[in-house]
Image (cartoon, rainbow, N blue to C red):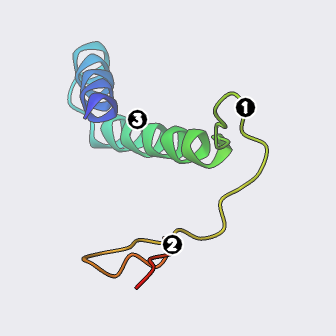
């Protein structure tokens, strides 16, 4: 939501600075989208302190089938 507000503010500033010119507005939108795409692709996953390995799979136990406990019958 915040990036859309910032992009809208950038377009509004370009509109107030250069007037309504479709080339300028389109160029600002295209460059803002390209900058956002580059920023998103350059973002590296953040590991929490103490994490060393990547989780490969997760197991979810639903209901009464608690397979990770050893129940004696």
Instruction: Say which of marks 3 and 2 sits in front.
Output: 2
Bin the neighbour count of mark 3 within 10 Å (Cα to Cα): few under 14, some 14-19, many 20 and up: some
Which secondary structure lies at badge 3? helix
Residue situated furthest right in the rendering: 52
User: What's the residue at 29%, 28% (across, down)?
Assistant: 2
User: What's the residue at 68%, 27% (across, down)?
Assistant: 49
What is the CA distance from the residue labelled 2 to the residue labelled 1?
A: 25 Å
Which residue does the numbered mark 2 point to in the structure image? 68
Quadrant in the rendering for residue 33? top left
Which badge, 2 or 1, is on the more N-terminal residue? 1
User: What's the residue at 53%, 48% (across, down)?
Assistant: 37
15 versus 24 height, above or below: above
Bin the neighbour count of mark 2 within 10 Å (Cα to Cα): few under 14, some 14-19, many 20 and up: few
Which secondary structure lies at badge 1? loop
Which residue does the numbered mark 3 point to in the structure image? 28
Residue 21 position, x and y percent, is 27, 35
Which residue does the numbered mark 1 point to in the structure image? 50
Foreground of the two, 21 or 31: 31
Q: Is residue 22 left or right of residue 49?
A: left
Which badge, 1 or 3, is on the more N-terminal residue? 3
Quadrant in the rendering for residue 73? bottom left
């Amino acid at each position: 939501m915040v990036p859309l507000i910032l992009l809208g503010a950038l377009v509004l500033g370009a509109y107030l600075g250069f007037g309504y010119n479709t080339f300028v507005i389109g160029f600002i939108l295209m460059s803002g989208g390209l900058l956002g795409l580059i920023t998103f692709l350059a973002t590296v996953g953040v590991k929490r302190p103490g994490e060393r390995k990547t989780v490969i799979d997760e197991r979810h136990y639903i209901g009464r089938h608690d397979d990770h406990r050893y129940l004696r019958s």
